[in-house]
């Protein structure tokens, strides 16, 4: 409950901003890691949207997740420039080592693996991100815990 | 005391620039965090008292990576840096607004005339003449008008928007304020993708600095961060997203210049289009039109990526051949294997092969190949590229990123992906090619926007099937 009131405050602070519901959902992701049913209700109430509208926004944007991600969230670029630099092999290697496919999270929430389309380091691929850290010329060792 | 320019730019930082900056400070250097020059293979590249070094791994072995005076590095000296002239040369926040304030005294009519004379066309992909949009927004009466900057740089192989926003954010602020003044818009919003956190941080800092300098007294400037959707690079999808909704594309007309954000006249431009404006006004539109070839005037910020020896950003006049860019500037593949293919213009661009390499990089010549120059990105592959796999990816990417509003794109991409899978498995080859061709025809003719409309380009070119 205390948590929900903090989220309510976070969401209310966005009122009046351009594209506010999206910014509010981003803030929830940053604060809580994923978006719960309760959060959907808060966003719907604050912006006078239906819950279906809010779920529609969440499902549209890949930054938003309704399930928790791993404490170590690994994202490997899957786009063409990184394909040319070997991201398919890297993804296979990491995936095998973790026993996780793209879009999956380990049961203990320690690690999650996700694809991403372009981090803008396209001349130095394959690129990847581990939590907030961006990695150029990524290797399997860079990414594994 | 020696002065060291250390890039604060995502790639350089990923390769150790932050640590180098700290170490240089500890050694008593005056450290300035600058933008990057865009030469990816030399990052992190330091400039110490005018002398360049890169890639720097160890400060005790600088001489081993000495590059000489920064302005004499051929890969910089031979460029025609109009957008990027300041980038890399100092603290991006160290900005003198005198020139801009002077330009803002010119009449809107005069500024639009310069843009018309320059022949500037959109650098985001569509290549639409900029002055027509400016004139339309200017001429459409409305209670409020907007400048919207498309910094949702989602094309693989592109990073020009990121580099300029990290390295010279005031170039974009200049472009936005000049466009606002010329069109009568008093609010500007930058739509930046969430994958660029450093660009967001630096640009937000630049907005604060601009406010401090008194540049934003009659203009509201905002930064909006996207939420991970390639389709939001499509201008009407971007506008929907800015209104806080799903980024589903709108039917056109009306075009955004007439009814855009909140149905008000909106000038939507790519970052590099707006960043080209100050250079045009500095040299005059007529002088800018002398650069380049035919209707492809001025400089293009080409970005060379993928499996390439010397990848990075090269700002050059339109008109050089793909071969010159890939071989002379890029030095061929990084793997050392023979060249395989180059995808020009992002995920919706064509795969071109050896026989196409002498094509000049202009809007017209690439269009003749059924390709397109897009945002100027070129992704190089070596000869291990699997054409079937790339065609499959083109459909799969479209299926993943389609906004779902129109049927040809939503269903076509999924069916296309399945059909390529069947083709790859060796099932009914001729039949499958016919299905793929038909799907491509329908997507091209009937999709609402370029996502579905152009996905057939990489598919057909990868599979070697013509129209």
Image: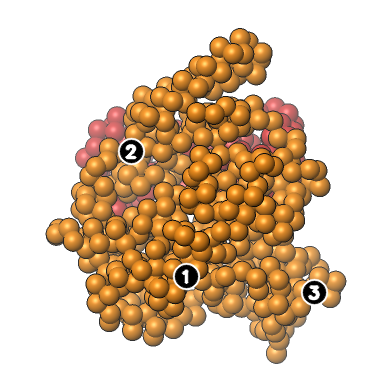
Chain colours: A red, B orange
Q: Position of residue B82 (x, y in %)?
A: 51, 71
Q: Position of residue B200 (x, y in %)?
A: 47, 60
How far apart marks 1 and 2 lie (CA) works out to 37 Å
Q: Tag 1, which chain?
A: B
Q: What residue sits right under mark 3 in the picture?
A: B66
> Which residue shows up at 21% across the image and 40% down it?
A48
Task: Return the disc, 1 or 2, that comes first in the chain's sequence.
Answer: 2
How far apart marks 3 and 2 lie (CA) works out to 50 Å
Task: Return the disc, 3 or 2, that comes first in the chain's sequence.
Answer: 3
Q: In this view, does B184 lie above or below B417?
A: below
Seen in the image, is A111 located left or right of residue B289?
right
> Which residue shows up at 25% across the image and 62% down it?
B135
Looking at the rendered image, the disc whose residue lies closer to the viewer, 3 or 1, is 1
Can you name the residue that lies furthest to the front here? B294
Q: Are marks 1 and 2 on the same chain?
A: yes
Can you name the residue that lies furthest to the bottom here? B1
How many residues crowd around disc 2 within 10 Å: few (fewer than 14), some, or many (20 or more)?
many
| Foreground pick, B148 / A95 | B148
Q: Tag 2, which chain?
A: B
How many residues crowd around disc 1 within 10 Å: few (fewer than 14), some, or many (20 or more)?
some
| Foreground pick, B415 / A120 | B415
Q: What residue sits right under mark 1 in the picture?
A: B290
SS for dot 3: strand
């Amino acid at each position: 409950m205390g948590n929900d009131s903090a989220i309510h405050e976070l969401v209310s602070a966005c009122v009046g901003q351009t594209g506010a519901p999206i910014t509010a959902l981003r803030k929830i992701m940053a604060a809580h890691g994923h978006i719960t049913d309760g959060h959907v209700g808060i966003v719907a109430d604050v912006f006078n949207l239906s819950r279906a509208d809010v779920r529609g926004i969440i499902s549209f944007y890949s930054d938003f997740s309704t399930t928790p991600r791993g404490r170590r969230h690994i994202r490997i670029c899957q786009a063409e420039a990184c394909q040319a630099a070997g991201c398919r092999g890297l993804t296979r290697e990491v995936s095998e080592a973790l026993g996780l496919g793209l879009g999956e999270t380990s049961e203990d929430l320690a690690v999650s693996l996700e694809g991403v389309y372009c981090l803008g380091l396209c001349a130095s691929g394959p690129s990847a991100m581990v939590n907030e850290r961006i990695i150029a010329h990524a290797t399997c060792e860079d990414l594994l815990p | 005391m020696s002065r060291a320019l250390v890039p604060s730019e995502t790639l350089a930082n990923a390769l150790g620039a932050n640590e180098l900056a700290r170490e240089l400070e500890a050694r008593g250097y005056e450290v300035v965090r600058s933008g990057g020059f865009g030469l990816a293979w030399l990052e992190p590249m330091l400039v110490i008292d005018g002398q360049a070094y890169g890639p720097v791994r160890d400060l005790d072995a600088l001489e081993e990576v000495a590059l000489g005076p920064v302005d004499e590095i051929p890969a910089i000296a031979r460029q025609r840096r109009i957008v990027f002239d300041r980038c890399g040369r100092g603290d991006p926040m160290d900005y003198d607004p005198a020139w801009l304030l002077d330009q803002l005294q010119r009449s809107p009519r005069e500024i639009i005339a310069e843009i018309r004379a320059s022949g500037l066309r959109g650098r985001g992909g569509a290549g639409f003449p900029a002055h027509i949009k400016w004139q339309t927004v200017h001429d459409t009466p409305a209670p409020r008008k907007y400048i919207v900057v498309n910094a949702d740089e989602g094309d693989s192989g592109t990073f020009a928007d990121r580099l300029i926003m990290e390295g010279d954010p005031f170039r974009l602020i200049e472009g936005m304020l000049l466009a606002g003044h010329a069109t009568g818009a008093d609010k500007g919003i930058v739509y930046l993708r969430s994958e660029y956190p450093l660009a967001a941080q630096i640009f937000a800092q630049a907005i604060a600095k601009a406010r401090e300098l008194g540049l934003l007294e009659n203009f509201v400037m905002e930064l909006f961060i996207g939420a991970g959707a390639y389709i939001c690079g499509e201008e009407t999808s971007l506008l929907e997203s800015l209104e806080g909704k799903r980024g589903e594309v709108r039917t056109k007309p009306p075009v955004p210049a007439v009814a855009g954000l909140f149905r008000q006249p909106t000038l939507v431009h790519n970052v590099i289009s707006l960043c080209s404006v100050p250079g045009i006004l500095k040299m005059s539109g007529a002088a800018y039109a002398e650069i380049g070839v035919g209707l492809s005037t001025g400089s293009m910020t080409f970005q060379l990526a993928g499996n390439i020896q010397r990848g990075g950003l090269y700002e050059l006049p339109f008109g050089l051949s793909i071969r010159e860019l890939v071989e002379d500037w890029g030095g061929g593949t990084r793997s050392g294997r023979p060249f395989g293919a180059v995808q020009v213009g992002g995920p919706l661009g064509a795969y071109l092969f050896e026989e196409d390499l002498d094509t000049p990089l202009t809007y017209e010549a690439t269009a003749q190949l059924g390709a397109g120059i897009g945002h100027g990105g070129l992704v190089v592959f070596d000869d291990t590229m699997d054409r079937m796999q790339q065609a499959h990816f083109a459909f799969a990417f479209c299926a993943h990123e389609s906004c779902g509003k129109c049927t040809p794109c939503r269903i076509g991409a999924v069916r296309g992906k399945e059909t390529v899978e069947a083709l790859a498995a060796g099932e009914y080859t001729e039949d499958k090619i016919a299905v793929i061709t038909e799907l491509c025809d329908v997507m091209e003719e009937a999709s609402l926007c370029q996502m579905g409309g152009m996905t057939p380009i990489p598919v057909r070119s990868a599979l070697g099937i013509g129209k």
